[in-house]
Image: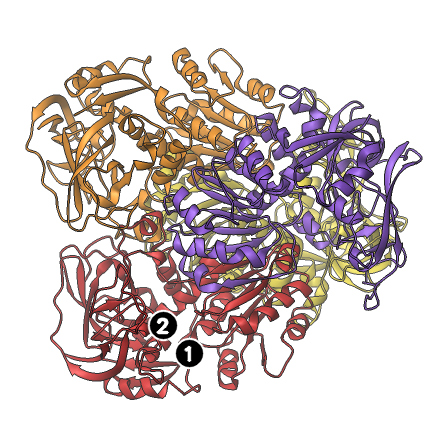
Chain colours: A orange, B purple, C red, D yellow
Amino acid sequence: MKAVELSAKWDPKKNFKLGSRDIDGKLTYLGSQVWRHPEVKVVDKQKPKIQPNEVLIKVKRCGICGSDVHMLQTHDDGYIYYPGLTAFPAVLGHEFAGEIVEVGNKAFSKRTGKVYDVGEPVTVEEMVWCGECKPCCDGFPNHCERLQEIGFSIDGAYAEYITVPAKLCWSLKKLQKKYKDVYKIGSLVEPNSVAYNAVIERGGGIRPGENVVILGGGPIGLAAASILKFAGAGVCIISEPDANRANLAKKMGSVDYTINPMKENFVEKVKEYTDNEGAAIYLEATGLPQVVTEDIQNCIWECKNVNSTVVIVARAEQRMPVCGEYFQVRRAQIVGAQGHSGHGTFPNVISCMAAGMDVTPMITKEITLDDVPANLKLLQTDRENCKISVKIN
Amino acid sequence: MKAVELSAKWDPKKNFKLGSRDIDGKLTYLGSQVWRHPEVKVVDKQKPKIQPNEVLIKVKRCGICGSDVHMLQTHDDGYIYYPGLTAFPAVLGHEFAGEIVEVGNKAFSKRTGKVYDVGEPVTVEEMVWCGECKPCCDGFPNHCERLQEIGFSIDGAYAEYITVPAKLCWSLKKLQKKYKDVYKIGSLVEPNSVAYNAVIERGGGIRPGENVVILGGGPIGLAAASILKFAGAGVCIISEPDANRANLAKKMGSVDYTINPMKENFVEKVKEYTDNEGAAIYLEATGLPQVVTEDIQNCIWECKNVNSTVVIVARAEQRMPVCGEYFQVRRAQIVGAQGHSGHGTFPNVISCMAAGMDVTPMITKEITLDDVPANLKLLQTDRENCKISVKIN
Amino acid sequence: MKAVELSAKWDPKKNFKLGSRDIDGKLTYLGSQVWRHPEVKVVDKQKPKIQPNEVLIKVKRCGICGSDVHMLQTHDDGYIYYPGLTAFPAVLGHEFAGEIVEVGNKAFSKRTGKVYDVGEPVTVEEMVWCGECKPCCDGFPNHCERLQEIGFSIDGAYAEYITVPAKLCWSLKKLQKKYKDVYKIGSLVEPNSVAYNAVIERGGGIRPGENVVILGGGPIGLAAASILKFAGAGVCIISEPDANRANLAKKMGSVDYTINPMKENFVEKVKEYTDNEGAAIYLEATGLPQVVTEDIQNCIWECKNVNSTVVIVARAEQRMPVCGEYFQVRRAQIVGAQGHSGHGTFPNVISCMAAGMDVTPMITKEITLDDVPANLKLLQTDRENCKISVKIN
Amino acid sequence: MKAVELSAKWDPKKNFKLGSRDIDGKLTYLGSQVWRHPEVKVVDKQKPKIQPNEVLIKVKRCGICGSDVHMLQTHDDGYIYYPGLTAFPAVLGHEFAGEIVEVGNKAFSKRTGKVYDVGEPVTVEEMVWCGECKPCCDGFPNHCERLQEIGFSIDGAYAEYITVPAKLCWSLKKLQKKYKDVYKIGSLVEPNSVAYNAVIERGGGIRPGENVVILGGGPIGLAAASILKFAGAGVCIISEPDANRANLAKKMGSVDYTINPMKENFVEKVKEYTDNEGAAIYLEATGLPQVVTEDIQNCIWECKNVNSTVVIVARAEQRMPVCGEYFQVRRAQIVGAQGHSGHGTFPNVISCMAAGMDVTPMITKEITLDDVPANLKLLQTDRENCKISVKIN
């Protein structure tokens, strides 16, 4: 079968010490410290075989994620950008939907409680949580201690077929009434689940009528805006310097106002648009916490709202200069968000879509498997596209 | 000024004992045990005068509530239906909006933090919570131990003017952008806040995408459906035997399916409409718990959803035959809901309306102050109307 | 190896229909409808063999649970009392602790994150949750759709050895500092976890200083009292007609007052002991909801506390005559509780024990494996003992 | 009557602009910008008179708070340390208990629901929340927009008598059974309520058995340790460089381990004492967030616990260098805590004390009113004492 595979050279940096769960020459939790000179190719691979608890999926759609881009993108020294769990060579691709074509005899459907039916349209969690470590047993699969990741440390879905444990699959059947192409919208369940986990599970959601402010108009920011507006946000504001993305946010209908933080005074604009109330949730989705933290906390300080929650969803190593007093006086909090598994997130996102939360305008370009390598490169600089979707099979 | 006043005879039933907070001849917490032969008249009263912490409101709109009807409606022995806190004579009317025309020097606006501006459009909580008893101090004003109620135990808003403590007022200013008549929609804030308190504050709200089932299509049921759909409900079902009300529910656009429980199998229909999932919230808004409890808990038992919450908002003395095992196996709960004050409820409902939750179709008839007595009688039997709205000034 | 095994005749009652997950002649979800003429014997069985994800445990202690008694106890027609999931013949026993003596190569310890060490003292969840159904994936393993139960549907721990999945094990190592016999206290983790799940996870716990009332002084009631007092309960009251049990409650030091509901007025006593405040949690642990519901809700009604939670932990089919109005006026709620898995319950109970919550006085008698059949019979009538503990190996 | 009054010169710094709620020459929200050359004297004042909603209290005990010290302590330029709401001259003192000796006719007791009895022992909230602004109406009195503070902006309790609104009083009656001197322990309710609000209301409390780490062994840190241990903390650790305070922590029995962060490696010690688990709550009570933030988040990062909450209770202007990634990977959060009012905090603290949480060892010195000025000076440098208690009447 056809697949898009990334290979790279295992060449640890001088100071790098193998972690306790790293595997020499094969797998690391700190990709950017180890992998050098990555290459992506369309290859021919053997169709994978299922275990009793697995299903074989004929992949129909797979979206390109920023992580995919960063596994191929390198610094001047040839080391990859992507800092996380990786094991190469690996087929990339983890935002996907497809049709079940083969079923193990212990591969149960969460929709029916029975073994999966062939033909069921599904989407799949990217995080292969073990279900047996302490965080998993306590109900926190996003913090699994023995995580594998589809399209990072095990083969992904830029391929004609993929096998996955049935427990990671979620039926798309209820989307058939509203959407002609359930796989297209279905491939957006994963990124929307990351946003849902951030603002609903970790941010605690909103009471209908409360305001929200999203910083950053990338896919996660846009998804969060859609979810929070669908959840009854009063005023929904997105702050994004790129005009394309800001316009897309407006076009999707979930945003009441956009702010260009390079040209406008963020705090003043939030005050103006919310009649000085401020917001219940501020989502940091820019990856530049050192830049936006001051703005967010000045907003919290100057606006009248108490009990605001700052949700950090974008990854960044930079420190945030947090002023505790602002959080005391305004009864505010900061939470970190990671992952998309557990807590009913995937099925709830699918239900939102079935009930009318149509986020397909996020997809700004559709390509084939053969186009993936070129588009991974394009996205290193392109800011015109939001989500590129790969049509497969 | 013109006002609609109810008077009745203080004639306690034989077994009635004055409660510790009742006032002989004047006020009781158990209206139906005491008041007989009620009469409602349009009268001429003196315009009331404000205290330093109060505002004078020129009333623009006041909706008719079922409680208003039940204060005039009598059993064969002449005692009134309404069982709660009452002190007659009193001007009725508590679902109102109006314009501030006079302001005490300690009458602060929660919107500006300053003394109220003349001309501000406002709506008002009906519950005059004391702010000093233990429940009030602990944050539970809906359970105030020294409650007074506007239009029940003190003069209400079927009148040209009313004075109220500023702390009970909430600005309608943010509705001006979307609604031509802010007073019409503003008079619906109170009943919608009762529903919001039930499903959001007490029921815990929903995660976007979760299903809800509303039993009873009266004003509170319809309001709850609007709020929950606005809050991102997946499938929203209303169970209501009256065709007019069921149709109104559909017309308002917040309900996906209606069930006629007299003609259809409630449990089967819920299973069908939710693909056997059931609902996260079941709202008992019928006042017939002895009739619907079995249906609700069979739904919980037979559907796959865990963690359902049954919210009881309608008042009723009848016992509910609750089977604890169903609630154990399905991890379910039952909560009682009362009131509309505190917890940000009024301002959040106004924000929902500003953000697009237009519940004005609930108003099925508009009348004048002079028409109120006749319409209070009409509503004793009429099921065609949902909410009758009185235009004043 | 030596083991205590129960066998019975598969003889379904006339109206019994095999459920979708029942297995003819072997396993049923409704034991009392199917199993007849049970017998318990000490037998010699082969020592079991481990799978890669399992450990072999040398059992040291196993407590007798009421369920064990009810699997042997029969009605006049010979059918067993126990109504739940069962597959016979099976070795009984599920409240146990032991030492790990053999370890599969994928049998990870949640304490170390590595494969288990031989010699580690552990206790084990009784519920073998699948980790793959919707409730499991959403974080509710107590409501697993494909549950197996140790000592009910698969072989239990009245035996010298048992194999179990490593994910169900919890280390008792941190008890070694405080307890000479970690296995004795360790065998009490399971019943205490049922109580912890009821009052902490499902009941929401208490704020330190709040009052609690426990109805029923059996092992679960006593465990709940210990946990809630350890969690900072203000006044802790237990209502129990049996003098032995009431005295044991007092002796354990977690109860401030006991009520004999057969001789004293429950409501008056709660009011007296709490200065009319009532309680934040009322735990129904009697199994007689039809008897105690009225008392509980009268307490809620007459006491001043708002926001009380009634937790139903004892199983019973009888309906509770719930008056919704009481729950509205007092802002109260009812929750059903089942199970002991997930939510950090087992490790938290062990930590409580390590920090001083010594519940060993619950054990009122210690026996050997050979004594089990006779003691199972004895407990059908005996009310003198609280927990009988079997010393093994 | 005798009272200890502080006066100072209103001499705003050059850049100071009067805030919207400041009153020229009298009251400011930023004390350290305005007040210069403070003096404290024992004076003779007229006994105050009550309003209808007030009570007159004969003060029995009043503790010295760090804020009292900072109102007298000055920088080299003569401006006071204390940065908050102040209006001088004012009688200081706000951690007090006393006996009600006169009662307004609308001064209701939250214990009885009736007008207060003369003779009732009470303690009093320091925060005079208005009950009418948006935060108050929404249930957040600690964030009142029109706050007055007893002993800061209105006369306090280093005096023989004080009048206060009845709504701020809480009965100490239930302490009489356990404590000989209810006023001594009663004067500790206020600082313990600040700690309770921080760790229970804002920090969300703990599940019994979870570990906690307190940074800073001042009165709030010690109170928090007592409360959390009373609430069932597993391992309770306090980090405090001063040996006196560390020893007091141990002597009070609520702390399992102390760390001297000047001499020991904080992260290593926390890992050692918790078997690498870390803590559910980290309380920042040092006032040096720039120093301790790195330690706290390294602990969160290196320990296994997910879902930790960092509570900031000490005031400080310095920024905290927060690394969002640590909070993402460990599912952690930061909350700011302020105040002691609302949420049942005062009555719950009193109930904890009644149930055995005896924090009187915190009081390390007892003095008279005449000794107050000298002791306020002494405490500018002294680190030997924890809480100095003033005996009055």
Residue identifier under label 2: C188
Quadrant placement of the N terminus of chain B: top right
Tag 2, which chain?
Answer: C
Can residue D275 be spotted in the picture? yes
Quadrant placement of the C terminus of chain B: top right
| As drawn, B201 above or below C290 | above
Identify the residue at horizontal 9%, vertical 40% (top origin): A49
Three-letter amino acid code at disc 1? Met
Q: Say yes or no: labels 2 and 1 on the same chain.
A: yes
- Secondary structure type for disc 1: helix
Determine the CA span between mark 2 and mark 1.
Answer: 9 Å
Tag 1, which chain?
Answer: C
Residue identifier under label 1: C362
The reply to whether dot 2 and dot 1 touch (C-beta < 8 Å) is: yes
Query: Most extreme residue toward the front, as rendered?
Result: B263
- Given residues D77 and B141, the one toward you in this image is B141
- Given residues D27 and B74, the one toward you in this image is B74
- Secondary structure type for disc 2: loop
- Toward which corner of the image does residue C211 lie, by quadrant? bottom right
Three-letter amino acid code at disc 2? Leu
